[in-house]
Image (cartoon, grey):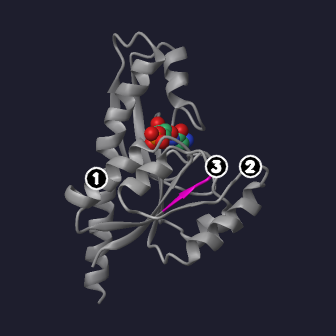
């Protein structure tokens, strides 16, 4: 048995790409299958990434939709794919209360900062502007708040000597890519054990 996962994106899709590779031949192989990629933007680079890996991608455009209305659009789109988990990978919309309730404890996000120190978008720009010598990335479950859900994993990103925002982002993404798949594997294997135990 493998878990069925939807990956939600808004942009480049580098975390998506790593998850797809790990699901094919890495720590997520035999653990989960990316059933569908959902993008909030038609122009997102991650749509091509999904195609390269033979995974269906659907666009559920978020422009002009309120959080709650967009949440309903997403729920409707996800319904057909019967997923166990929703994985946010650079998804830049707030998740609606209805969606959190529908997938409680089953929506995971990666955040480019320590969620206790900084919430919202542009976490690397914040770290760079503040001149931090170290920042962090956090994998957490999504609840009703902005980056307030239970932390599953956090890892430090050393920034000493990073002269540009681009360098900060590059260092952060290297850590994100490793940490996200590792953490998802741990979470999903645990879930599978619970299911086997209750079978
Ligand atoms: C990543 O840095 C991710 O942590 C961030 O968006 C980027 C997406 O990159 N997410 C957030 O800021 C969510 N608040 P990717 O599209 O290359 O995976």
Write the residue at 33% across / 42% down.
177
Of labels 2 and 1, earlier in sequence is 1
Would you name the residue on which mark 3 appears? 93
Would you name the residue on which mark 1 appears? 21
Q: Is residue 61 above or below residue 158?
A: below
| CA neighbours of label 1 inside 10 A, class few (<14), some (14 to 19), many (20+) | some
Q: Nearer the viewer, residue 163 or 137?
A: 163
Answer with the quarter of the image where residue 191 lies. Answer: bottom left
Q: CA distance from mark 1 to mark 3?
A: 25 Å
Of labels 2 and 3, earlier in sequence is 2
Q: Predominant secondary structure in magenta? A: strand
Q: Is residue 143 above or below residue 90?
A: below
Query: Is 195 covered by the magenta stretch?
Result: no
Of labels 1 and 3, earlier in sequence is 1
Q: State the image coordinates of residue 176 (x, y, percent, origin top left).
A: 36, 39
Write the residue at 48% across / 47% down.
46
Write the residue at 62% across / 49% down.
41
Q: State the image coordinates of residue 198 (x, y, percent, origin top left).
A: 31, 87
Would you name the residue on which mark 2 appears? 63
Q: Secondary structure at mark 3?
A: loop
The magenta region covers: 37-41
Q: Secondary structure at mark 1?
A: helix
Residue 183 seen in the figure:
no
Write the residue at 27% across / 79% down.
1
Q: CA distance from mark 2 to mark 3?
A: 10 Å
Identify the disc placed on residue 127: none
Q: State the image coordinates of residue 10 (x, y, percent, origin top left).
A: 57, 47
Query: Is 40 covered by the magenta stretch?
Result: yes
Q: CA distance from mark 2 to mark 1?
A: 30 Å
Answer with the quarter of the image where residue 160 lies. Answer: top left
Q: Nearer the viewer, residue 105 or 99?
A: 99
């Amino acid at each position: 048995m493998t878990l069925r996962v939807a990956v939600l994106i808004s942009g480049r899709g580098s975390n998506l790409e790593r998850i797809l590779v790990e699901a094919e031949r890495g720590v997520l192989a035999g653990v989960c299958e990316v059933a569908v990629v959902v993008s909030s933007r038609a122009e997102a680079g991650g749509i091509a990434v999904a195609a390269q890996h033979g995974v269906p991608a659907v666009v559920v455009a978020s422009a002009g939709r309120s959080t709650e209305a967009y949440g309903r659009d997403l729920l409707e789109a996800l319904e057909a794919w019967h997923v166990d988990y929703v994985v946010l990978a650079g998804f830049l919309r707030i998740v609606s209360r209805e969606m959190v309730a529908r997938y409680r404890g089953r929506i995971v996000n990666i955040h480019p900062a320590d969620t206790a120190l900084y919430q919202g978008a542009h976490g690397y720009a914040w770290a760079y502007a503040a001149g931090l010598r170290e920042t962090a990335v956090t994998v957490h479950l999504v609840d009703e708040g902005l980056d307030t859900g239970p932390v599953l994993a956090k890892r430090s990103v050393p920034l000493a000597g990073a002269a540009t925002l681009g360098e900060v982002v590059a260092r952060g993404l290297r850590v994100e890519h490793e940490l996200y798949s590792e953490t998802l594997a741990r979470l999903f294997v645990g879930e599978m054990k619970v299911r086997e135990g209750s079978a």
